[in-house]
Amino acid sequence: MGAETAPAPRTDRIPSFVHQRNRLTEGQQSAWDRLWHRHGRDVADLVEGREPYDPPAWFGRTAPLVLEIGSGMGESTAALAAAAPDVDHMAVEVFEPGLAQLLLRVESSDLTNLLLLRGDAVALLDACIPVDSLDGIRIFFPDPWPKRRHRKRRLVQPGFVGLAASRLRPGAILHMATDWADYAVQMRDVADAERRLQRAPEAGPNGFVPRPDWRPVSKFEQRAITEGREVSDLMYEKHH
């Protein structure tokens, strides 16, 4: 079965993404047909109960579990999973060509600790992921929705950060990165206001952390740097 746009879960909130049909290349469609049933799940199936949310069954083990929200074309996601084989990674994304490219990376690197999820990350967190169950949440370069009238669509809002914090285990890290200065400030202010989170020890007085050496530089990030935009990393630890 070919890639199709995942149905949007019913919700009154304003989504941080736009549903659209994305045409796959021939190679991407071949990867989807060959690999999705092994390495992917649809969020709508989990939310609506057609399939259980069961990471130990998916990965064949119980291990630390990290969720990446918005994996894009997947180069950083695959590299991070390959660098941490003892950690299980879930990558949730709505962009089918990006998921197809990530499937190819999973195949070429023989990754067994990475599962792809197609659909709405907020619905997944809200309806499927248990409280105090994640060892990390990563949000790298979410859509900045730069126009003022669209900023209500930004993912990192108080309600979302509260939901994310509730799903982290004590001691787990929420790690965010953006190349939009005003979004970085919004991320910091919203996370600072969440009582269950505290700034990571390495955070400077402005709330930002030095760019971690272990976070790969994606083509997207390199383009931002080339165009003169400063990249900001933020890390928050759940403390209770």
Image: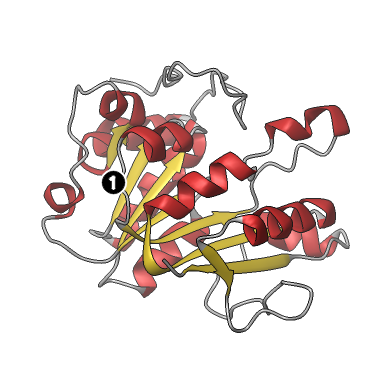
**SS for dot 1:** loop
Q: The disc labelled 1 sits on which kind of residue? A: Pro
Residue at 39 percent of width and 24 percent of height: 3
Q: Nearer the viewer, residue 64 or 170?
A: 170
Q: Nearer the viewer, residue 77 or 29?
A: 77
Is residue 104 among the parts visible in the rendering?
A: yes
Residue marked by disc 1: 130
Q: In this view, does 9 lie above or below 60?
A: above
Residue at 68 percent of width and 41 percent of height: 143
Tell me if 181 is positioned left or right of 156 in this view.
right
Quadrant location of the C terminus? bottom left
Tell me if 38 is positioned left or right of 13 in this view.
left
Is residue 219 among the parts visible in the rendering?
A: no
Q: Picture coordinates of residue 195 (x, y %)?
A: 56, 59
Residue at 20 percent of width and 49 percent of height: 55
Q: Picture coordinates of residue 124 (x, y %)?
A: 38, 36
